[in-house]
Image (spheres, rainbow, N blue to C red):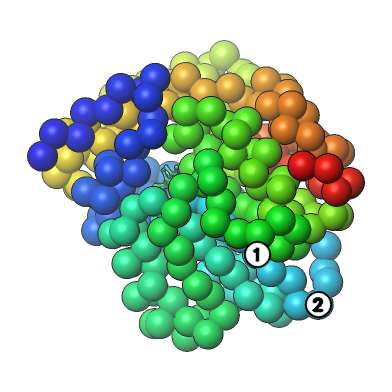
């Protein structure tokens, strides 16, 4: 199967995940040296405690963000995971049954550009390593703002590049040489992990991404670099009803 995808047109990028779904979790742990767990756990501490919260996780993949929240936060009443890849969602559903979270989670196949939820529906929304697979991130950010309740928060986790020149050199070497090689060996897909690293180098991060959140109408925006800046958590609040 030819999964070569033009990074200027990311609309079909979910098809990559439909092909590598079986090895996705393993490769996440391997390639991030377990850091992905630490990053997700950081996210779980961010939303304020409030009873009966509803969480929407966009580009949920195999559901790890949802499961981290359900494990750590008793104030989460219900979670909704949205993704375009049927196979990634299939793994998420199996995991939710195994972890006994199936009564508190639902998974929907859908496009983050057009979230199939009514306005002011969720208390907070997360998107981890998904936004850089989107051609027009501001469209998704605006739709996240639409479905958030007033006072709600968007939390975006995405790869970024370290500020330190030496760290950036090593990270780019790792991205360009090691990630595609290990990705190809473990997943058996020639293009997937090359595409994934190309999108990292190409994507706005730090202040540039904060500007996109501003354009989408978010307030109190912040960027928190993690692990030498190879990933960043962005937060923004919806403080008024305007969409
Ligand atoms: C790198 S994975 C991230 C999965 C998960 N959030 C995690 O942290 O492991 C990116 C996910 O984005 C999904 N995706 C790509 N384009 C999408 C879109 N337009 N709408 C919803 N999901 C999309 C893919 O199917 C894939 O599951």
Q: Is residue 243 above or below residue 179?
A: below
In this rendering, the count of numbered labels is 2
> Where is residue 138 shown, x and y percent of the image?
63, 31
Q: Residue at x 26, y 50 (%)?
A: 18
Q: Residue at x 58, y 22 (%)?
A: 204
User: In what quadrant of the picture does the C terminus appear?
Assistant: top right
**Which corner quadrant of the image does residue 231 belong to?**
top right
- 70 relative position to 234: left or right: left
The residue nearer to you, when weighing 223 against 78, is: 78
Q: Disc 1 and disc 2: Cα gap in Å?
A: 12 Å
Query: Does any atom of ligand 1 lie closer than 8 Å to the CB of label 2?
Result: no
**Which corner quadrant of the image does residue 94 belong to?**
bottom left
Q: Secondary structure at mark 1?
A: strand
> Where is residue 234 shown, x and y percent of the image?
69, 39
The residue nearer to you, when weighing 222 against 19, is: 19
User: In what quadrant of the picture does the N terminus appear?
Assistant: top left
Q: Is residue 212 visible?
A: yes
The residue nearer to you, when weighing 102 against 67, is: 102
Mark carried by residue 28: none
Q: Is residue 212 above or below residue 99?
A: above
Q: Secondary structure at mark 2?
A: loop
Mark carried by residue 51: 2
> Where is residue 28 shown, x and y percent of the image?
38, 50
> Where is residue 168 shown, x and y percent of the image?
52, 20
**Which corner quadrant of the image does residue 205 belong to?**
top right
Query: Would you name the residue on which mark 1 appears?
Result: 55
Q: Which class describes the residues within 10 Å of circle 2: few (<14), some (14-19), or many (20+)?
A: few
Q: Residue at x 37, y 63 (%)?
A: 89
Q: Which class describes the residues within 10 Å of circle 1: few (<14), some (14-19), or many (20+)?
A: many
């Amino acid at each position: 199967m030819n999964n070569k995808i033009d990074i200027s047109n990311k609309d079909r990028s979910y098809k990559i995940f439909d092909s590598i779904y079986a090895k996705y979790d393993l490769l996440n742990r391997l390639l991030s040296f377990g850091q992905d767990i630490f990053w997700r756990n950081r996210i779980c501490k961010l939303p304020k405690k409030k009873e009966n919260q509803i969480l929407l996780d966009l580009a949920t993949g195999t559901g790890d963000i949802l499961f981290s929240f359900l494990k750590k936060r008793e104030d989460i009443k219900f979670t909704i995971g949205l993704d375009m890849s049927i196979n990634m969602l299939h793994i998420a559903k199996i995991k939710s049954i195994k972890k006994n979270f199936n009564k508190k989670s639902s998974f929907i196949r859908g496009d983050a550009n057009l979230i199939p939820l009514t306005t002011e529906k969720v208390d907070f929304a997360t998107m981890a390593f998904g936004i850089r697979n989107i051609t027009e991130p501001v469209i998704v950010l605006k739709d996240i703002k639409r479905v958030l309740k007033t006072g709600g928060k968007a939390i975006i986790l995405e790869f970024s590049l370290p500020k330190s020149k030496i760290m950036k050199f090593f990270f780019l070497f790792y991205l360009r040489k090691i990630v595609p090689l290990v990705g190809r060996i473990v997943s058996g897909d020639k293009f997937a992990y090359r595409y994934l690293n190309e999108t990292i180098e190409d994507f706005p991060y730090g202040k540039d991404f904060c500007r996109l959140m501003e354009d989408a109408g978010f307030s109190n925006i912040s960027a928190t670099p993690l692990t030498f800046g190879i990933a960043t958590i962005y937060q923004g609040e919806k403080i008024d009803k305007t969409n």
